[in-house]
Image (cartoon, helix red, strand yellow):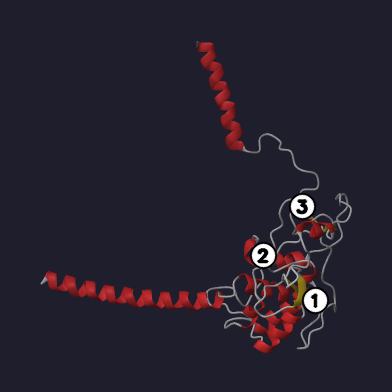
Amino acid sequence: MTRRLATLSRRLAIASLIAAGGGLLPAAVPAGAAEETVPPPMEWSFSGPFGTFDRGQIQRGYKVYREVCSACHSMRMLSFRSLAEPGGTEFSAAQVKALAAEFEVEDGPDDNGDMFTRPGLPSDRFPSPFPNEQAARAANNGALPPDFSVIAKARPHGPDYIHALLTGYEEAPAGFELRSGMSYNAYFPGRQIAMASPLGEDVVEYTDGSPETVEQYASDVTAFLMWAAEPKLEARHRMGFNVMIYLLILTGLLYAAKRRIFAAVAH
């Protein structure tokens, strides 16, 4: 009995060491895996409790999305008319109508029971560039391009990660096994990504004199994606500020009432 208790005690001690140490025993690491690289923090106009969107930047970001990103990435949760709503991108209704018409949208069935395509309308959502998931994977080396509707809120580090990813393409370091068809990116999990670098110098023409550089494109499209993920951000910031003012006033009134009541009780 004593020997059995001693054996059990040793097993419990070993189990405790493993659980507490976590790294005492070597763990299997998938080939090509790498530690996560935290993106450098950026200064965004929409950051902080009083942040607001730069409308010019959002409009430029939409242009980058339309001319570069929309070839692979959908935004199925966003309607074209959202671009003209209060607190939006400040595109006019006429501009939004013209922007929507640049897309082909599937509709139907018609009187013969057939589906057909037509120019987009402001009431339509942004269409997917592929008819189905299999077609999307076949066109992208087996990878499924993510939907961009809320990606700025769905990814860790949000806008900072998107900007770092878009500007983080570089040559793979010596000894790194890069799979066929993949690109090296220090900020992507595993550091190899199926998407080739989508941006380059002068790939999108700006009409407001902004620099046509990878850095500028990445910043602009990131701001647009942040707006798309949280178009009511400014309204939320205003509401939060109003609530704080209300609470401060209420706190002052309650404190004054407390002093008045206890002063009366003391006398």
**Mark 2 Cα-neighbour bin, 10 Å: few <14, some 14–19, many ≥20:** some
| The label number, if any, that marks residue 151 in the structure image | 2
Give the farthest residue toward the front: 112
Tell me the residue at 69%/84% (across/down).
Answer: 96
How many marks the image carries: the answer is 3
Contact between marks 3 and 1 (CB within 8 A): the answer is no
Amino acid marked by disc 2: Ile
Amino acid marked by disc 3: Gly
| The label number, if any, that marks residue 67 in the structure image | 1
In this rendered view, identify the residue nearer to me: 150 or 196: 150
Could you tell me residue 122's position as x and y percent? 67, 80
In this rendered view, identify the residue nearer to me: 238 or 7: 238
Q: Earlier along the polypeptide chain: callout 2 or callout 1?
A: 1
| The label number, if any, that marks residue 190 in the structure image | 3
**Mark 1 Cα-neighbour bin, 10 Å: few <14, some 14–19, many ≥20:** few
Q: Is residue 72 above or below residue 224?
A: above
Q: Quadrant of the C terminus?
A: bottom left
Amino acid marked by disc 1: Glu
Tell me the residue at 23%/75% (across/down).
Answer: 257
Q: Secondary structure at mark 2?
A: helix
Q: Quadrant of residue 18?
A: top right
Q: Is residue 13 visible?
A: yes
Could you tell me residue 133's position as x and y percent? 76, 58
| Distance (Cα) linking label 2 and label 3 | 19 Å
Could you tell me residue 20's position as x and y percent? 57, 36
Give the farthest residue toward the left: 267
Q: Nearer the viewer, mark 3 or mark 1?
A: 1
| Distance (Cα) linking label 2 and label 1 | 18 Å
